Image (tube, rainbow, N blue to C red):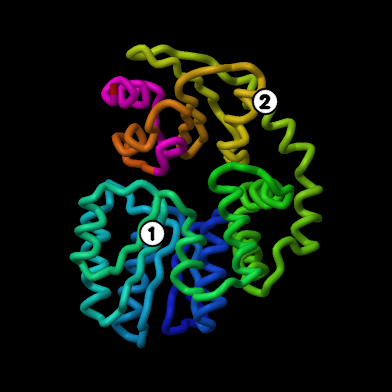
């Protein structure tokens, strides 16, 4: 956390996370921003605890990240330590949480703002702006278009692919661009053009890898060994577009699983496996087997 400020943001790295961090940073000015995954969140919280013991840190904002079920006790403890070090923690998210998670995190000392019908950027805009702002509204629209997979804007699809493909340095550059007021910089267009054809080929390969199961009366479509750089929503869309229908779609990555469904609450299934997300789109980080997934689906019936 170089150039440490007394306000810190820890935010997810997708479009909602990046636009959320940019909105807070544009409003509060002097902040240090760290981009994170759900699984890395406790590690970054621990670093802030250590820093707050030796430096003046006033506020911590956790954005677009839901607490990982298997790490809850650790998160509660870290939030309490931050409170004891006089750090005000504000947690803003739009994923599905168990009620007890919110209760215990607030009890530990954080302010928690949840709205599953919004994107995190939209919650922040409503909290921090008391009158319309054209650029902030554009950032919220970008987040909404991506997170709800509406794809009304070409730039949404381009950013989604660039962020998945190029990883952390590009994600930080995207955040800096949004913070400066630039939605689609020239360098991003160059990166997108470099990957466009290969991305399409990998989508076709993912569709070709699909097969189906039936468990407890549920038709499960599985895409196996999917390239980590492909967005799960686009894999799902391509599978359905090729006439492969099911009740639940399971996208197997080397380091995790994504789930999609129009008829079942996949967040409940993901929680059984240590993950989480939304009712229609959820995921699990780490190694998960098909056998474990099928059992979780059967147990949810």
CA separation in Å, label 1 and label 2: 33 Å
Disc 2 residue crowd, few under 14, some 14–19, many 20+, Cα 10 Å? some
Vertically, is 147 above or below 41? above
Task: Give the residue drawn at x 36%, y 36%.
Answer: 270
Q: Nearer the viewer, residue 235 or 37?
A: 235
The x, y position of residue 129, in whole percent, is 51, 74
Is label 2 in a helix, a strand or a loop? helix
The x, y position of residue 163, in whole percent, is 63, 52
Q: Is residue 237 left or right of residue 103?
A: right
Vertically, is 230 above or below 212? below
Task: Give the residue drawn at x 32%, y 35%.
Answer: 268
Q: Is residue 300 left or right of residue 249?
A: left
Q: Is residue 165 left or right of residue 291?
A: right
Disc 1 residue crowd, few under 14, some 14–19, many 20+, Cα 10 Å? many
Q: Which residue is mark 1?
A: 41
Q: Which residue is mark 2?
A: 205
Q: Which residues are magenta?
A: 277-300
Q: Quadrant of residue 8?
A: bottom left
Q: Nearer the viewer, residue 223 or 280?
A: 280
Task: Give the residue drawn at x 21%, y 58%.
Answer: 103
The x, y position of residue 233, in whole percent, is 57, 37
Vertically, is 202 above or below 49? above
State yes or no: residue 139 in magenta: no
Q: Which mark is residue 185?
A: none
Query: Do residues under tags 1 and 2 come within 8 Å of each other at their CB atoms?
Result: no
Vertically, is 31 above or below 149? below
Q: Quadrant of residue 283?
A: top left
State which tag comes first along the sequence, 1 or 2.
1
């Amino acid at each position: 956390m170089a150039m440490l400020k007394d306000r810190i943001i820890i935010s997810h790295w997708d479009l909602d996370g990046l636009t959320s961090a940019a909105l807070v940073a544009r409003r509060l000015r002097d902040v240090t921003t760290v981009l994170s995954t759900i699984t890395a969140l406790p590690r970054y919280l621990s670093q802030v605890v250590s820093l707050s013991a030796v430096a003046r840190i006033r506020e911590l904002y956790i954005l677009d990240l839901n607490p990982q079920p298997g790490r809850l006790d650790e998160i509660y403890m870290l939030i309490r330590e931050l409170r004891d070090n006089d750090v005000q923690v504000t947690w803003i998210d739009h994923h599905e949480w168990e009620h007890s998670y919110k209760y215990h995190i607030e009890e530990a000392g954080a302010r928690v703002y949840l709205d599953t019908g919004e994107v995190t950027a939209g919650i922040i805009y409503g909290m921090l702006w008391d009158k319309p702002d054209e650029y902030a509204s554009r950032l919220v629209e970008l987040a909404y278009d991506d997170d709800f997979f509406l794809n009304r804007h070409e730039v949404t699809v381009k950013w989604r692919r660039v962020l998945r493909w190029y990883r952390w340095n590009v994600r930080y550059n995207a955040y800096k661009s949004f913070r400066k007021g630039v939605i689609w910089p020239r360098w991003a267009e160059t990166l997108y053009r470099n990957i466009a054809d290969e991305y399409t080929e990998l989508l076709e390969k993912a569709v070709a890898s699909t097969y189906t199961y039936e468990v407890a009366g549920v038709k499960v479509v599985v895409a196996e060994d999917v390239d980590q750089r492909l967005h799960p929503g686009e894999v799902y869309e391509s599978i359905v577009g090729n006439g492969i229908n099911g009740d639940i779609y399971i996208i197997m990555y080397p380091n995790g699983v994504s789930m999609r469904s129009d008829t079942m609450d996949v967040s409940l299934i993901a929680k059984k496996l240590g993950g989480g997300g939304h009712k229609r789109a959820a995921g699990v980080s780490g190694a998960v087997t098909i056998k474990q997934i099928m059992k979780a689906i059967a147990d949810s019936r």
